[in-house]
Amino acid sequence: MNSVFNCFIPSENVLKTSLENIGAIFHPSIVLFNAAAIEREYHFYFRGADDISYVVSAYIAAKIVKLNGVRTIILQNMLNTPKYTWVVQDMAKSRVMLKLVKSSEDNNFRMFFQPRAGLDFFLPMYIKQKFNWLMLLQL
């Protein structure tokens, strides 16, 4: 672990790390006072930051696999996620994610980008559907 993350300090035992974990103090109050919100159909912790958390998670995942010696990854991007996302937002999110992850490329690490369309991306109106695909091809 220290070869990848040299900031970690080995613990004496698991009980010490469990009892000193701030999450045990921090999370119960959030859960108690937001129980109804947590039960809704979206990720409570991602609320209001869907696109940011999506892009950052892809970037962090690419960095981790590169540090672990993986030479090639396929970065899949599901478009129209969440389904209320406007096509221009979707394209912006895709471009930012692609640019960030591509910045990690070098002679030992390559990335292939695979955009995928969710079912909500296929609109019943042909003209709008054609616009979505034209925007996608510009990536």
Image (cartoon, rainbow, N blue to C red):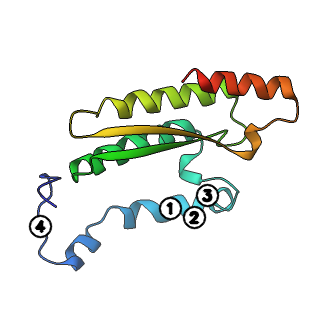
Secondary structure category for the residue under label 4: loop
Q: Nearer the viewer, mark 3 or mark 4?
A: 4
Q: Is residue 119 visible?
A: yes
Confirm or deny contact between disc 1 and disc 4 (CB under 8 A): no
The crowding category of the residue bearing disc 4, from other C-alpha atoms within 10 Å (few below 14, some 14 to 19, many at least 20), is few
User: Are the residues at dot 2 and dot 3 in contact (C-beta closer than 8 Å)?
Assistant: yes
Q: Amino acid at mark 1?
A: Ser
Q: Is residue 75 above or below residue 94?
A: below
Q: Calculate the distance from the C-alpha at mark 1 to the C-alpha at mark 3.
A: 8 Å
Give the labeled residue for mark 4. 10
- Give the image location of residue 84, x and y in percent: 73, 38
Label 2: element kind: helix
Say which residue label 3 marks: 34
Compared with 61, 10 (above or below) is below
Query: Does 61 sit left or right of 78 as displayed?
Result: left
- How many C-alpha atoms fall within 10 Å of the one at disc 1: few (<14), some, or many (≥20)? few
Residue beneath disc 2: 32
The reply to whether dot 2 and dot 4 touch (C-beta < 8 Å) is no
Mark-to-mark CA distance, 1 and 4? 29 Å
Q: Position of residue 43 (x, y in %)?
A: 60, 53
Tell me which numbered mark, 2 or 4, is placed earlier along the sequence: 4
Q: CA distance from mark 2 to mark 4?
A: 33 Å
Mark 3 Cα shell of 10 Å, populated few (<14), some (14-19), many (≥20): few
Q: Mark 1 to mark 2: distance in Å?
A: 5 Å
- The amino acid type, in three-letter code, at marker 2 is Leu
Residue type at tag 4: Pro
Q: Residue furthest right?
A: 125
Does the rendering let one see residue 57? no
If you read the primary sequence from the N terminus, does the residue marked by circle 1 or circle 3 appear first? 1
Q: Is residue 52 left or right of residue 129?
A: left
